[in-house]
């Protein structure tokens, strides 16, 4: 579905890493700004879907996001994405 776009692999920058670890992750990858922008889009999409499920009472989000390795719930991820706008 992603057609080999490396941007989908960047989702972990906002769901798994925080602060300095996200900066280190980004500095080690030689990807252009457009790829990082698409990565933010993928991360936002995943966080919004997860938040929607939480709001409808369809999932215990804390358990799900921890299983995926997220560092915080969907609202925290969304806040990170929005704060990281260049």
Image: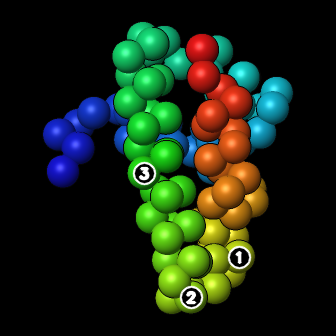
**Which circle's residue, 3 or 2, is located before the other in the chain?**
3
Residue 70 seen: no
Distance from disc 1 to disc 3, alpha carbons, whole Å, reads 18 Å
Can you identify the residue that label 2 sits on?
A: 57
Q: Is residue 4 above or below residue 74?
A: above
Secondary structure beneath dot 3 equals: helix
Distance from disc 3 to disc 2, alpha carbons, whole Å, reads 19 Å
Residue 60 seen: yes
Residue 40 percent across, percent down from the top left: 49, 35
**Which circle's residue, 1 or 3, is located before the other in the chain?**
3
Residue for point 49% across, 46% down: 44
Could you classify mark 3 by the number of other residues whose Cα lies within 10 Å: few (under 14), some (14-19), or many (20 or more)? some
Secondary structure beneath dot 1 equals: helix
Determine the residue located farthest toward the right in the rendered image.
20
Total numbered labels: 3
Q: Are marks 1 and 2 in contact (CB under 8 Å)?
A: no
Residue for point 82% across, 27% down: 20
Can you identify the residue that label 1 sits on?
A: 62
Q: Nearer the viewer, residue 34 or 22?
A: 34
**Which circle's residue, 1 or 2, is located before the other in the chain?**
2
Can you identify the residue that label 3 sits on?
A: 45
């Amino acid at each position: 579905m992603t057609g080999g776009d490396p941007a989908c692999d960047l989702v972990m920058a906002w769901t798994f890493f925080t602060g300095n670890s996200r900066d280190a992750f980004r500095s080690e990858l030689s990807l252009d700004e457009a790829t990082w922008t698409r990565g933010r889009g993928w991360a936002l999409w995943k966080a919004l879907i997860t938040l929607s499920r939480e709001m409808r009472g369809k999932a215990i989000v804390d358990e799900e996001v921890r299983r995926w390795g997220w560092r915080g719930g969907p609202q925290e991820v969304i806040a990170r994405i929005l704060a990281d706008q260049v």
